[in-house]
Structures are given as C-alpha cells and as structure tokens.
Amino acid sequence: MISRLVPVLLAAASVVAAAPAVAQFAKSEDAISYRQSAMFLQAQHFGRVAAMANGRVPFDAAAAATNADLVATLSKLPWAGFGAGTEGGKAKPEIWKEQAKFKELSDKLQANTEKLAVTAKGGNLDAIKAQVAATGETCKSCHDAYRNR
C-alpha cells in the first residue's frame, strides 16, 4: 500500500515545490487545513519509524526507510500554509511576528528529516534511534514555540 502512495506523494511534492513560496488559498481556513493535514501525515509516518526506534514494534528496515522517505518529502509541504493572512488553527501568532526564527526551525526540520531518510536507508537501528531523537527534538522545539495545545 505504501509503495503505491510514494509516487503519488512525490508527484504532489514536486507540484508544491514548483509553486510560489506561499501558496494561494481561497480562505485562511484552507491554508490551516492544508498545513494541519501535512503535519498529520508527517506525524503518522514519523511515528511509525519512532515506534521501531523505541522498540514498540519490531524493526523492519524496509518499512523504516519507506516511512522516513515519506517524512522527508512531507516535511517540505506545510510551510506554504503559513502565509500572511493565514493565522489561526493551532498556530500561535508569534509565527507571523518571528518569521526568520520560524523559517530557521522549518529549515532545521527539513534537514533533520533528510538525515533521517539517509540514516534509515542504512538500516542501522542504533543510528536510526539517534536520528529519530534529533528529529523529534526539532519537532518539539517548534511546537513548543509556535503551536497552541
């Protein structure tokens, strides 16, 4: 099932990557829904790798690599949904006041998810555990600063 989704997700990501830095949304609610959906998918696939890294499910190197690749792809998506006039949802207003810091954290997340994808391809569970921790800490730092609970 996941192997059939990969080409679709990669095609969607290429379309998004070719779009302007800030996508045009008809309503702010559309942007909020878009970014929340992208974050949800990211969390689902990251959670699968993290569950293996934490020993909650048996380690499957192929599944870890596939899910880590998806996380790296999905990590590029939500940022288009944070344009001017898209405030709301679980996002704190500080996002729009601290754009440089927010961008720095989004760039760090994308770099860490790329490292996770590369690490997972290597199949070394200990290395995956370390990169899951680093990636998870990046997620947490951004959510702590910019997400309402």
Image (cartoon, grey):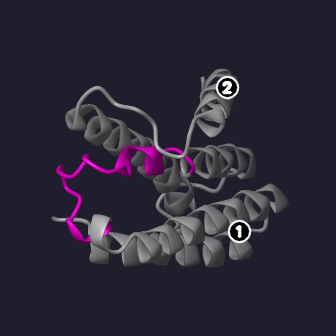
Magenta segment boundaries in residue numbering: 76-95
Residue 100 is situated, as x and y percent measured from the top left of the image, at 46, 74
Q: Residue at x 47, y 44 (%)?
A: 22
Residue at 68% x, 32% y is 14
Q: Is residue 116 magenta?
A: no
Q: Secondary structure at mark 1?
A: helix
Q: Position of residue 115 (x, y in %)?
A: 72, 66
Determine the image quadrant of residue 66: top right
Q: Nearer the viewer, residue 96 or 137?
A: 96
Give residue 15's position: percent from left, percent from top.
63, 28
Residue drawn at (31%, 51%) of the image = 84
How many numbered tags mark residues here? 2
Q: Which mark, residue 11? A: 2
Q: CA distance from mark 1 to mark 2?
A: 29 Å
Would you identify the image quadrant in which residue 130 lies? Answer: bottom right
Residue 84 in view here: yes
Residue carrying label 1? 125
The secondary structure type at the circle numbered 2 is helix
Image position of 141 (left or right of 46): left
Side (left or right) of 149 relative to 6: left
Dominant secondary structure (helix, strand or loop) of the stretch shown in magenta: loop
The residue located at (30%, 64%) in the rendering is 96
Placement of the C terminus among the 4 image quadrants: bottom left
Q: Of the residues shown, which amino acid type is indicated by label 2?
A: Ala
Of the residues shown, which amino acid type is indicated by label 1?
Answer: Leu
Whether 84 is among the magenta residues is: yes
Q: Which is nearer the eye, 12 or 128? A: 12
Q: Is residue 85 left or right of residue 133?
A: left
Residue 57: x %, y % from top left: 51, 55
Task: Examine the rendering and report whether any part of residue 136 can be seen.
Answer: no
Q: Is the residue marked by circle 2 packed among few (<14), some (14-19), or many (20+) residues within 10 Å?
A: few
Mark sitting earlier along the chain (1/2):
2
